[in-house]
Amino acid sequence: MSDSYLTKDSLGFIIYRTALALKGALQRCFKEHGYEITAEQWAILRHLWEEDGLSQREIAEKAAKDKPNITRMLDALEKKHLIFRQPDPQDRRKYCIYLTKDGRQLYERLSPLAQSLRQKVTANLTGPEIDSLKATLHKIYQNLGDL
């Protein structure tokens, strides 16, 4: 069997292992600073910091998660008093998700931690290498969407 088919050299395995390591590092970083925020919750909060008042469906699409997972994560964020749900005035079947004051303020505390981690993770990569890696991963993702 050629090396390209060995698990350790598999593109899917390398991407998966890297994603797990990044997720774990982010969660450890937050926890070390006293924040019980998961990587998935961080992703939801980031989308709300960019655009508050998204629907659950919009958050699911942006975070690439299914509805049951998003519901569970939103429930956890609501219990932490970081978000609240409000009926959509145009469609009573839909709820919009908003940040609480604590949720908005959390950005100022978590963002520098995430940025510091990103700098450590990419320390031996050049800007063009990072751009190339992102572009390549976007192409792979698009190719998967075409299957």
Image: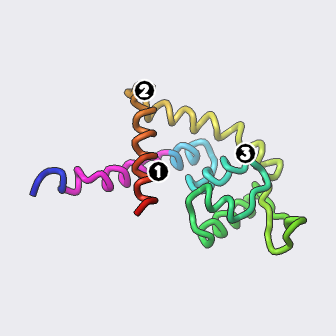
Residue ID for mark 3: 49
Mark 3 or mark 2: name the one nearer the start of the chain. 3
Q: Identify the residue at image location x=66%, y=47%.
A: 46
Mark 3 element type: helix
For the residues bearing labels 3 and 1, Cβ distance under 8 angstroms: no
Question: Where, quadrant-wise, is the C terminus in this rendering?
Answer: bottom left
Callout 1 crowding tier (Cα within 10 Å): few <14, some 14–19, many ≥20: some
Give the residue at mark 2.
Answer: 128
* Label 3 packing within 10 angstroms: few (<14), some (14-19), many (20+): some
Residue reaching furthest front?
146
- Magenta highlight range: 6-25
State the residue position of label 1. 24
Percent x, y of residue 38: 58, 55
- Residue flagged by tag 2: what amino acid is it? Pro
Three-letter code, disc 1: Gly
Taking 7 as reference, is 97 left or right? right
Helix, strand or loop for disc 2: helix
Q: Residue furthest left?
A: 1
Q: CA distance from mark 3 to mark 1?
A: 22 Å
Residue at (40% x, 42% y) in the render = 136
Q: Which of pointers 3 and 1 lies earlier in the amino acid sequence?
A: 1
